[in-house]
Amino acid sequence: DIVMTQTPLSSPVTLGQPASLSCRSSQSLVYSDGNTYLSWLQQRPGQPPRLLIYKISNRFSGVPDRFSGSGAGTDFTLKISRVEAEDVGVYYCMQATQFPYTFGQGTKLEIK
Amino acid sequence: EVQLVESGGGLVQPGGSLRLSCAASGFTFSTYNMNWVRQAPGKGLEWVSFISSSSNAIYYADSVKGRFTISRDNAKNSLYLQMNSLRDEDTAVYYCARVSVGIAGADYWGQGTLVTVSS
């Protein structure tokens, strides 16, 4: 199975400041079709997960442009350019390149 | 508007069975692959099972293989998860999630249904 490792596990951020969340996979996430099926999900308190970014860097419908994804191969990053209060929650990376799909353990974004 | 509504959760004793349902609306259900994903209380996300649009490809996590069965009824726009031989560690909120071609993973998620396995 592909192991997804997220760092940090907790990220206290000042409102209006940037945040950077990392995700590393135990093996390459490049699929045979050339795509890399790495997604980022946000889970606000008491809510189901919500897709933010798919295929490393594509923002999903309705996602603010302060969210951006980057990376390649086994190392990936989610950046929030200016953190807002509504961004509080847990962020998960997820790989869908190979079954079983696997998630990182999550990074909790908190406001300082 | 895409909507996924899970139902069927509840309290069940260890060794018991439960059948979860997910009612889909707002999209052509029969053309989308679907997942079940669960989240134990206070824990992270765990993928459970995948079914293709025509049910010809099905996958399970090792933790549920042989005990859970995923299925769908495209005529009823519904996804199911039959859970047998339930264990304490199956206690979780169970989410159904849609898979879009070109996105993979899961783009839309339901609100979830809580399954509690306890004596």
Image (cartoon, rainbow, N blue to C red):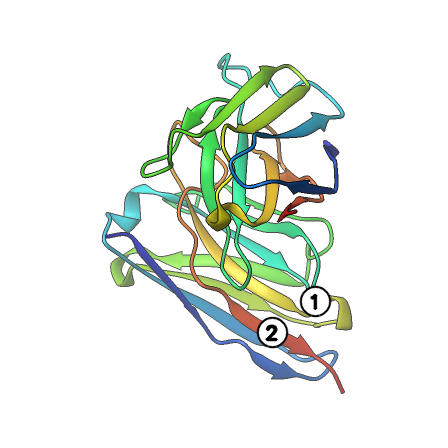
Sequence order check: which comes first, mark 1 or mark 2? 1
Three-letter amino acid code of the residue under disc 1: Asp
Q: CA distance from mark 1 to mark 2?
A: 8 Å
Q: In this orientation, which residue lies closer to the viewer: A78 or B15?
A: A78
Share a chain, discs 1 and 2?
yes
Q: In this orientation, which residue lies closer to the viewer: A95 or B70?
A: A95
Residue B26 appears in view: yes
Q: In this orientation, which residue lies closer to the viewer: A37 or B77?
A: A37
Picture layout, residue B64 above or below residue A10:
below
Give percent across and percent down for residue B24: 32, 59
Identify the residue shown where x is 75% and y is 71%.
B87
Residue A100 appears in view: no
Three-letter amino acid code of the residue under disc 2: Val
Q: Which residue is mark 1?
A: B90
Mark 1 lies on a secondary structure that is helix
Q: Quadrant of residue B93?
A: bottom right
Where does the N terminus of chain A fall, quadrant-wise?
Answer: top right
Identify the residue shown where x is 52% and y is 24%.
A69
Give percent across and percent down for residue B46: 65, 51
Q: Which residue is mark 2?
A: B115
